[in-house]
């Protein structure tokens, strides 16, 4: 349970500037303190909680950073909490819903964007849940972190997978800027393989050594150098695992305190959660583990907007958990992030005979929230998104839970790229579905408060051929854009006999059979047919995909790189088309810039009628359409 708040700072937002009917806002930062009873039935699933130190009352304590943004006059708010599950310690609510400049310590006009959430009267909050986040990291100041308990003295296998884009000799044992587990002893096994599930070759022990980075983090030194594109895996013995699952309980009790606690610094009537990528997977895991019910048996979240999580959960609640690891098509495939069950309603796992669904616990206890699952195209290629609505054999569409909608923004990448500043033959995918998030949040609110049904699910399906096997994709032969030969195809992982208790005993895991994953079907231009087609895709200026191949310099140029996508623009005129490019040019499709902008605007107006866009954002649609048109046409002159 949450025992107390300590407010370190309370500041007026933008000097007291009013935001619509909600008036002036304030933001609070500080610490929250928790004490968990390991014997409470709602805490029993937190792995190793019983091994952590206890206070005099027999409780396990921890502390977390928090941030709250609320109307100065609470009575002027709308009663809604938008709880943002921080991504690796970073806040992103304002960047997502207010189209703001990203900041972990917002204080300028740019940091608050167009003010949408504030004008609507939302209380916005975040609380740290990830215990390996440092308070500061290079290019990431003001991170928020959880001081979690430790199961001191425990040891066990830890996997450190390494993939580099340029040759290096030393690498952290952790993911990104996160704090790795301490090394016990001096033994370990370093292997290298070419493909995610390929055969691994051992590297001699005398060829590498344990080391430390300049900031003191444990690392590995490999004098021969890590070769770009190859997949290295170091398994070593770790010491003193963090009880990482406390992050789930911290989230539960922080939100519950704001919703039901009379003495909290913010009080709300309804709680909506938003998580993106890692944080979306965290919300799926929270539901599966039963953390949408607090210790008093009350429902925590009324609704969730789960963004770009695919069909995955995460490394969030087991011994030596590493929350920032996530399986993808080429990397980190051996971590327990995509595990059965993938879908909400029960189905059978043909590999094990097990039966279950993601929402089983929530349904049984009567605490199932309204849920929007939102996918970019990247999640189908790189995160098994089809497993959330197609059976694990890839043969039939699944029934969608009554409290769930599934939305796929066609032709998008994991997070939109900026428009290119200069000539670029293959820029990042700029289709920005944040505008869709703004509309969907209002639809989610209306579903909860008024019982008004939101737009129906909108994604590809097996039954109509808009979701297909990789072999049947039929992606057009486009110069400069060969499709990947491998997409994310998760396999059953066997981490040993104690895995059901959250203890990894076998690292790397034994590999079982594949789960089938399907991909969105495409048209003659290579653009996806089904899903929510935003104006950039409905009135295209090129081919927009949710994948991108590694470069030759990065190694493994046949493989998908990270979570990036790409945009292969159409030629400006027929005479500019590259050899082999059968796609009609911009001039053959649109008579003028004005016609193109009008076509994009018409697509936007249709999305407004369907509930996927706000009318206030149509001016942005027109402005963006003009910018993209100008860039495509001008690149002919520039090149």
Image (cartoon, rainbow, N blue to C red):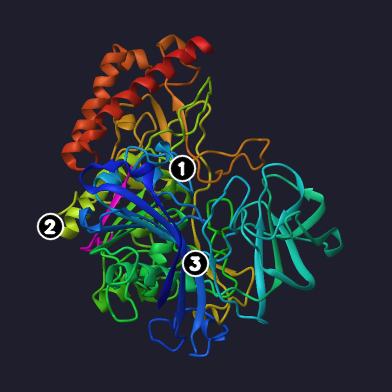
Is 236 or 435 nearer to us in this picture? 435
Mark 2 and mark 1 lie on one chain; the one further toward the N terminus is: 1
For the residue pair 551 and 372, the one nearer the viewer reads as 372
- Asked which quadrant contains residue 596, the reply is top left
Would you call the spot at circle 1 few (<14 residues within 10 Å), some (14-19), or many (20 or more)? some
Number of residues whose C-alpha sits closer than 10 Å to that of mark 2, classed few (under 14), some (14–19) or many (20 or more): few
Is any part of residue 531 visible from this angle?
Answer: no
Q: Are marks 2 and 1 in contact (CB under 8 Å)?
A: no
Residue bearing the label numbered 1: 102
Q: Quadrant of residue 172?
A: bottom right
Q: Quadrant of the C terminus?
A: top right
Name the residue carrying label 3. Answer: 64
Q: Residue at x 16, y 59 (%)?
A: 449
Q: Residue 186's x, y, as percent?
A: 81, 71
Residues drawn in magenta: 398-409
How far is disc 1 from disc 3 in space, using C-alphas?
22 Å
Q: Is residue 405 magenta?
A: yes
How far apart, in angstroms, are the residues tagged by discs 2 and 3? 34 Å
Q: Position of residue 158 (x, y in %)?
A: 65, 69
Instruction: Look at the image and say whether residue 236 sits in the magenta stretch.
Output: no
| Quadrant containing the N terminus in the rendered view | bottom left
Q: Secondary structure at mark 3?
A: strand
Compared to residue 270, the image places residue 373 above or below, namely above
The residue indicated by pointer 2 is: 450
For marks 1 and 3, the one nearer the N-term is 3
Q: Is residue 34 above or below residue 625?
A: below
Which of discs 2 and 1 lies nearer the camera? The answer is 1
| Element type at mark 1 | loop
Q: Nearer the viewer, mark 2 or mark 3?
A: 3
Q: Are marks 1 and 3 in contact (CB under 8 Å)?
A: no
């Amino acid at each position: 349970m949450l025992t107390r708040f300590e407010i370190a700072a309370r500041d007026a937002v933008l000097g007291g500037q009013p935001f619509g009917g909600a008036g002036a806002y304030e933001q609070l930062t500080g610490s929250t303190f928790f004490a968990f009873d390991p014997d409470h039935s709602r805490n029993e699933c937190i792995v190793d909680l019983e091994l952590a130190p206890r206070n005099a009352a027999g409780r396990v304590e921890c502390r977390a950073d928090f941030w709250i943004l609320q109307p100065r006059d609470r009575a002027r708010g709308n009663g809604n909490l938008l709880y943002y599950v921080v991504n690796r310690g970073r806040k992103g609510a304002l960047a997502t819903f207010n189209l703001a400049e990203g900041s972990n310590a917002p204080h300028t006009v740019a940091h608050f964007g167009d003010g949408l959430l504030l004008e609507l009267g939302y209380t916005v909050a975040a609380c740290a849940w990830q215990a390996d986040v440092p308070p500061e990291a290079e290019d990431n100041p003001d991170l928020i972190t959880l001081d979690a308990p430790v199961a001191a003295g425990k040891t066990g296998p830890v996997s450190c997978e390494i993939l580099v884009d340029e040759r290096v000799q030393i690498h952290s044992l952790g993911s990104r800027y996160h704090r790795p587990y301490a090394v016990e002893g001096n033994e370990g096994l370093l292997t290298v393989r070419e493909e995610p599930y390929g055969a691994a070759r051992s590297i001699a022990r005398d060829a590498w050594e344990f080391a430390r980075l300049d900031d003191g983090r444990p690392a590995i030194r490999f004098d021969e150098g890590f070769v770009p594109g190859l997949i290295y895996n170091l398994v070593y013995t770790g010491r003193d695992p963090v009880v990482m699952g406390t992050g789930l309980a911290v989230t539960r009790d922080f939100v519950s305190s704001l919703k039901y606690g009379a003495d909290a610094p913010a009080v709300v009537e309804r709680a909506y959660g938003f998580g993106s990528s890692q944080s979306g997977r965290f919300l799926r895991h929270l539901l599966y583990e039963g953390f949408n019910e607090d210790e008093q048996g009350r429902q925590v979240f009324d609704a969730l907007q789960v963004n770009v999580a695919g069909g995955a959960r995460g490394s969030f609640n087991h011994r030596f958990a590493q929350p920032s690891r996530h399986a993808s098509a080429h990397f980190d495939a051996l971590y327990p992030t995509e595990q059965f069950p993938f879908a909400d309603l029960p189905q059978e796992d043909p590999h094990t005979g097990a039966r279950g669904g993601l929402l089983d616990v929530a349904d049984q206890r009567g605490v199932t929230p309204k849920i929007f699952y939102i996918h970019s195209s990247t999640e189908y290629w790189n995160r098994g998104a089809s497993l959330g609505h197609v059976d694990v054999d890839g043969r039939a569409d699944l029934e969608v839970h009554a409290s769930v909608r599934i939305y796929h923004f066609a032709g998008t990448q994991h997070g939109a790229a900026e428009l290119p500043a200069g000539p670029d033959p293959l820029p990042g995918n700029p289709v920005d579905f944040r505008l869709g998030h703004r509309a969907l949040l209002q639809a989610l609110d209306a579903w909860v408060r008024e019982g008004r049904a939101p737009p129906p699910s909108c994604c590809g399906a097996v039954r109509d051929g808009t979701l297909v096997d990789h072999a049947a994709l039929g992606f057009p032969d486009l110069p400069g854009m060969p499709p990947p030969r491998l997409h994310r195809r998760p396999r059953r992982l066997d981490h040993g006999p104690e895995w059901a208790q959250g203890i990894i005993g076998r690292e790397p895991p034994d590999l079982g059979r594949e789960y089938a994953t399907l991909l969105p079907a495409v048209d003659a231009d290579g653009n996806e047919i089904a899903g929510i087609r935003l104006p950039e895709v409905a009135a295209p200026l090129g081919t927009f995909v949710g994948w991108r191949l590694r470069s030759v310099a990065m190694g493994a140029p046949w493989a998908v790189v990270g979570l990036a996508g790409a945009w292969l623009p159409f030629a400006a005129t027929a005479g500019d088309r590259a050899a082999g490019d059968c796609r009609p040019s911009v001039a053959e499709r649109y008579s003028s810039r004005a016609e193109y902008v009008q076509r994009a605007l018409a697509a936007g107006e249709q999305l407004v009628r369907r509930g996927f866009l706000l009318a206030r954002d149509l001016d942005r649609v027109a402005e963006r359409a003009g910018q993209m048109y100008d860039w495509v046409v001008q690149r002919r002159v520039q090149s």
